[in-house]
Amino acid sequence: MKEKIEKILDEIRLSLSAEGGDVELVDVSEDGVVKLRLTGACGSCPMSMYTLKMFIEQKLKESITEVKKVEQVF
């Protein structure tokens, strides 16, 4: 599943990099919890939780049915 997630994250990175940010895959649990770290401008942005939940999590869940939840790690 990590390979599938990385493929989707590569697509998402294009949008994030336009704003000076990036996303890093930290871990994927057996029960479908994906742990990500937002870096660059996204790491300190006050809208980072919105980006994580409404953009990244939604895209991952739509594309990969095994993904149940996305959590941010710092």
Image (tube, rainbow, N blue to C red):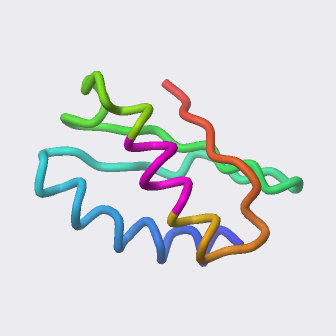
Occupied quadrant, residue 40: top left
Q: Residue 21 in the image: x percent, y percent?
A: 22, 45
Of 24 and 44, the residue lying toward us: 44
Magenta segment, which residues? Answer: 51-58
Q: Residue 49 in the image: x percent, y percent?
A: 44, 32
Asked if residue 30 lies left or right of residue 20, the reply is right
Residue 57 located within the stretch drawn in magenta: yes
Of 58 and 6, the residue lying toward us: 58
Asked if residue 16 lies left or right of residue 6, the reply is left
Q: How many marks?
A: 0
Q: Is residue 23 above or below residue 47?
A: below
From the image, give the main secondary structure of the stretch colored magenta: helix
Q: Residue at x 57, y 65 (%)?
A: 60
Q: Residue at x 46, y 38 (%)?
A: 37
Asked if residue 65 lies left or right of residue 11, the reply is right
Q: Residue at x 19, y 34 (%)?
A: 41
Q: Residue 53 in the image: x percent, y percent?
A: 51, 43
Of 28 and 50, the residue lying toward us: 50
Occupied quadrant, residue 71: top right
Occupied quadrant, residue 1: bottom right
Q: Residue 27 in the image: x percent, y percent?
A: 66, 48
Q: Residue at x 65, y 68 (%)?
A: 2
Residue 53 located within the stretch drawn in magenta: yes
Asked if residue 70 lies left or right of residue 21, the reply is right
